[in-house]
């Protein structure tokens, strides 16, 4: 078969070459979409932020899904190190339930090197709980010096000024009575909540709570996996088709904001499209 275009007769060899070039371009694009991490900075204002925390930098790491992480363990660490964070938070699914060796998949190296950069706080995701390595992972996290927050809070202090970091267990909705620690201690402080699933948004903004987070950091949705340019993602777990909360900063009721990361790995779907791996960097500002 021969194809004639503008009086040029293409032979089979030409057609094969064109096919190979187009295939290489498509393959290269898909590769970049799954390996090229986007570091995105968000300057977020708090009306009651203490002066000492102006410019406080938080790197948000979510859904690395080791061993199905984007880029390499060392490259991820280098990217985080480059941001010079004051704090690193991890919002669940550090490991994938299909993983079988925490050393070989890079999790051990990641945890032990991460704590050399700054303080690290983590919460659980659905993959940790369903992994056969859950107990081993939990021991690794704690022995590495990462603080695992399970329905509790911690307070950061600089120059006698304070902000609060809260962490929820996976699938636990936000309610002040569900915390093992007394949230009355932080009622007058800026409050940042780590919660794996953004679809719990109704509990974050609920009128039933007298103490709510000012900012929620979440993941889980993987950016909707396949994103239609200038529109939205196509699917995410727990939200289904055309999910509402897939990535970026959302304004909820009662002055609650929620920042959702697209994550740094793949899970059930083996690849992303128009949806690069995502590392948000939050810079706190005073309003």
Image (tube, rainbow, N blue to C red):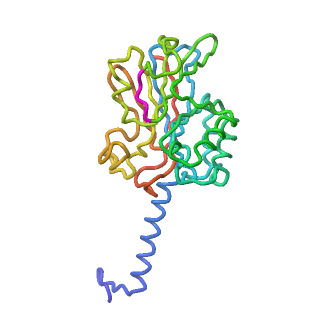
> Percent position (x, y) of residue 129?
51, 42
Is residue 237 placed above or below 202 in the rendered structure?
A: below
Quarter the C terminus occupies: top left
> Percent position (x, y) of residue 55?
56, 23
Front residue of this view, candidates 198 and 37: 198
Q: Which residues are magenta?
A: 171-175
> Percent position (x, y) of residue 19?
41, 76
Front residue of this view, candidates 159 and 18: 159
Whether residue 125 sits left or right of residue 15 in the image: it is right
Secondary structure mostly seen in the magenta stretch: loop
> Percent position (x, y) of residue 104?
66, 55
Q: Is residue 174 magenta?
A: yes
Front residue of this view, candidates 180 and 229: 180
Q: Residue at x 60, y 54 (%)?
A: 100
As drawn, which residue projects farthest toward the bottom? 1
Is residue 125 placed above or below 4 in the rendered structure?
A: above
Q: Residue at x 47, y 42 (%)?
A: 126
Q: Is residue 122 magenta?
A: no
Is residue 154 placed above or below 103 in the rendered structure?
A: above
Is residue 96 placed above or below 188 in the rendered structure?
A: below
Q: Residue at x 48, y 26 (%)?
A: 193
Whether residue 2 sits left or right of residue 22 in the image: it is left
């Amino acid at each position: 078969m021969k194809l004639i275009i503008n009086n040029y007769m293409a032979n089979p060899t030409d057609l094969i070459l064109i096919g190979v070039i187009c295939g290489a371009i498509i393959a290269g694009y898909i590769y970049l979409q799954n390996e090229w991490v986007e570091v995105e900075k968000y300057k977020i204002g708090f009306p009651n932020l203490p002066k000492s925390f102006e410019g406080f930098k938080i790197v948000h790491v979510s859904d690395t899904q080791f061993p199905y992480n984007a880029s390499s363990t060392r490259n991820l660490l280098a990217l985080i190190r480059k941001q010079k964070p004051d704090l690193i938070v991890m919002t669940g699914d550090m490991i994938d339930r299909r993983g079988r060796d925490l050393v070989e998949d890079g999790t051990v190296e990641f945890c032990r090197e991460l704590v050399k950069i700054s303080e690290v706080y983590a919460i659980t995701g659905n993959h940790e709980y369903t992994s056969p390595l859950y107990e081993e992972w939990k021991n690794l996290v704690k022995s590495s010096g990462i603080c695992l927050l399970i329905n509790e809070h911690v307070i950061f202090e600089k120059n006698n000024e304070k902000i609060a970091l809260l962490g929820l267990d996976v699938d636990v909705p936000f309610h002040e009575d569900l915390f093992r620690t007394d949230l009355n201690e932080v009622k007058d402080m800026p409050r940042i909540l780590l919660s794996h699933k953004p679809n719990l948004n109704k509990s974050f903004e609920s009128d039933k709570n007298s103490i709510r987070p000012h900012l929620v950091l979440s993941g889980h949705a993987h950016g909707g996996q396949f994103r239609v340019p200038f529109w939205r993602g196509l699917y995410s777990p727990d939200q289904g088709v055309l999910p509402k909360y897939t990535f970026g900063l959302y304004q909820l009721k009662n002055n609650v904001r929620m920042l959702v990361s697209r994550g740094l790995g793949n899970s059930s779907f083996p690849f992303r499209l128009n949806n690069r791996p995502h590392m948000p960097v939050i810079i706190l500002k005073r309003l």
